[in-house]
Image (cartoon, rainbow, N blue to C red):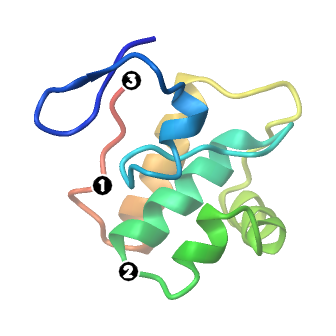
Amino acid sequence: MEMDFGRGIKNKSRSLAALAPLKKSIVNVKSENNFLPHALIIAFARITKDRNYKSFRDGRKLGPAVRQLLESTGINLDLGGGIRELTQFQEYYLITEFLFFFRFRV
């Protein structure tokens, strides 16, 4: 996969996994299950300038945060997630955090 690496330079020699630590816009979620809430927590921490953002990005401290998010939303991801679950997460953030600018695009 070709990736732009600043100023439109094509970087054919680096994979997406190699670029993830270098580019802040790419987040590599290291989870075998529940990767959707992991990614949302990392993105939300970045937007709100949470002090745990770096820990979340490195894959630490995510377990309790994911459990809390899933319990508070009531979303069950045992069978996976889709557009319906994304909509539920968006409604949760809209109601609880008043994030009118926080919208998911698929």
Left or right: residue 41 versus residue 23 is: right
Query: Which amino acid type corresponds to the residue marked 3 in the rendered image?
Result: Val
Q: Residues within 10 Å of mark 3 (few under 14, many from 20)?
A: few
Q: Residues within 10 Å of mark 1 (few under 14, many from 20)?
A: some
Left or right: residue 35 versus residue 32 is: left
Q: Nearer the viewer, residue 71 or 47?
A: 47
Query: Which amino acid type corresponds to the residue marked 2 in the rendered image?
Result: Lys
Q: Residues within 10 Å of mark 2 (few under 14, many from 20)?
A: few
Of the two numbered discs 3 and 2 in the rendering, the one whose residue sits closer to the viewer: 2
Left or right: residue 96 versus residue 15 is: left
Q: Residue furthest bottom?
A: 51
Residues at marks 3 and 1, CA–CA distance in whole angstroms: 13 Å
SS for tag 2? loop
Q: Residue furthest left?
A: 7
Quarter in which the C terminus is drawn: top left
SS for tag 3? loop
Where 53 falls versus 41 (above or below)? below
Query: Which amino acid type corresponds to the residue marked 1 in the rendered image?
Result: Phe
Residue 58: percent from left, percent from top: 67, 64
Numbered mark located on residue 102 in the image: 1
Image point (60%, 63%), residue name: 57
Q: Which residue position is annotated with label 2? A: 49
Numbered mark located on residue 106 in the image: 3
Question: Which of the two discs, 1 and 2, labels the residue nearer the N terminus?
Answer: 2
Image point (36%, 76%), residue name: 48
Where 99 falls versus 23 (above or below)? below
Asked if the residue under mark 1 is in contact with the one under mark 3, i.e. CB atoms within 8 Å, the reply is: no
Where 52 falls versus 21 (above or below)? below
Residues at marks 3 and 2, CA–CA distance in whole angstroms: 24 Å
